[in-house]
Image (cartoon, helix red, strand yellow):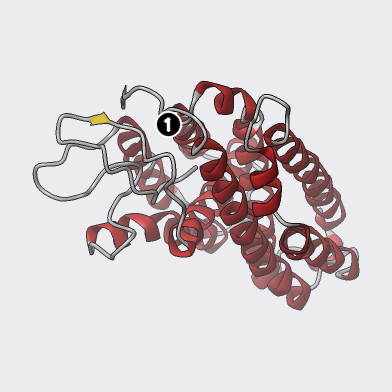
Amino acid sequence: MQPTRERPGATATGVAMPAPSNARPTRAAALMQVLATGGYGVWLWLGLSLLLGVSPPGRNGTLVPLGLGAVLTGSGLLLASLRIPGLASWHGWQPRPGHRPTRSALMALATWLPVLAVAGLARGDNGFWVTRLAGAALMLCSLVSLLLATHDDRACLPLPLQRATALLPACRITIAAYIGGLWLWLCVLAQGEFEGGRGAYLWVLLLLALSLGQGLLESGLWQSLREPETPSGEAVAKHGSFPARLVAALLSYALPCTALLLGGVAGSLPAAALAAPGSLLGQLLERYLYEGALAVAAGARPPAPGRVH
């Protein structure tokens, strides 16, 4: 998902032209994208836990992760509304008079409706059927927002690169679940919900499995950019240099997984406090490198036709 990428071709009629093929992401924009992805991941897990009736008991057990997700996902919209240079666009929409929201922006705004519903319904053990229904809506809206934003991002690429990024939707969902799961783990540990090791062991195993799956998906994405059909493969390989990608992998996977394993069965709050921010930093670097490589690859191809969002 790329909620803060500039799309200069977007107009008040809702027709979004593709970004220039040689446009490169800024570090600030990449940070907002990763923050939003993590926020949707927190909402995905929270909505699923409410639907299944296994969410942490008490109002704070719901409101704390709900508020954390709101901060992570809402940062891009806030900065776009303030017209921060380089971050004036949110999901291809400039939030100011005379500019109509794009399809992706409308879906992202609609996701806040179940957020407000869950915040108002959070009570006790959250077993009320309406609360579970609101949780299901929160989970589905977050998932659709991720998929729709990813679809719009791929639509701006030339056709060969759309084929090369076929794994991108699965990659975005997996990384959202991974980062969101780490932040939710931190929230739960901070409130003492894993005392005695209840559920912590299975949660750690799940996060470790997600980290493995995400690593495999990212490797597949980079490999697709080096396929023979990509004429700028050498430039792409140079842009995604091994030392920088190694640092990204250490921060994204090695540090969080080590913290998960060292935390023990009951979990460790200091370990969680290292794992969650570390995954964000690692994915920030990974996202910046990969989108830069996409820009290099797209620079060797004619731009795709404009699309309606």
- Name above or below for residue 261 compared with residue 169: below
The reply to whether residue 67 is visible in this rendering is no
Q: How crowded is mark 1: few (under 14 residues within 10 Å), some or many (20 or more)?
A: many
For image coordinates 66% across by 72% down, the residue present is 190
Q: Which residue is drawn at 62% across and 34% down?
A: 168
Quarter-of-image position of residue 255? bottom right
User: Who is closer to the viewer here, 292 or 235?
Assistant: 235
Residue 149 drawn at (x, y percent):
45, 36
State the residue in front, 303 or 81.
Answer: 303
**What percent of the width, then of the height, locates residue 209?**
83, 45
Name the image quarter holding residue 269. Answer: bottom right
Which residue is found at the position 37% from the left and 57% from the top?
76
Q: Name the residue under label 1.
A: 156
Query: How far across and down, in percent of the image, does residue 13 sit?
Result: 15, 29
99 lies left or right of 3? left
Residue at 21% across / 49% down in the picture? 95
Q: What residue type is labelled 1?
A: Cys
Up the image or down, 85 lies above or below 73; here it is: below
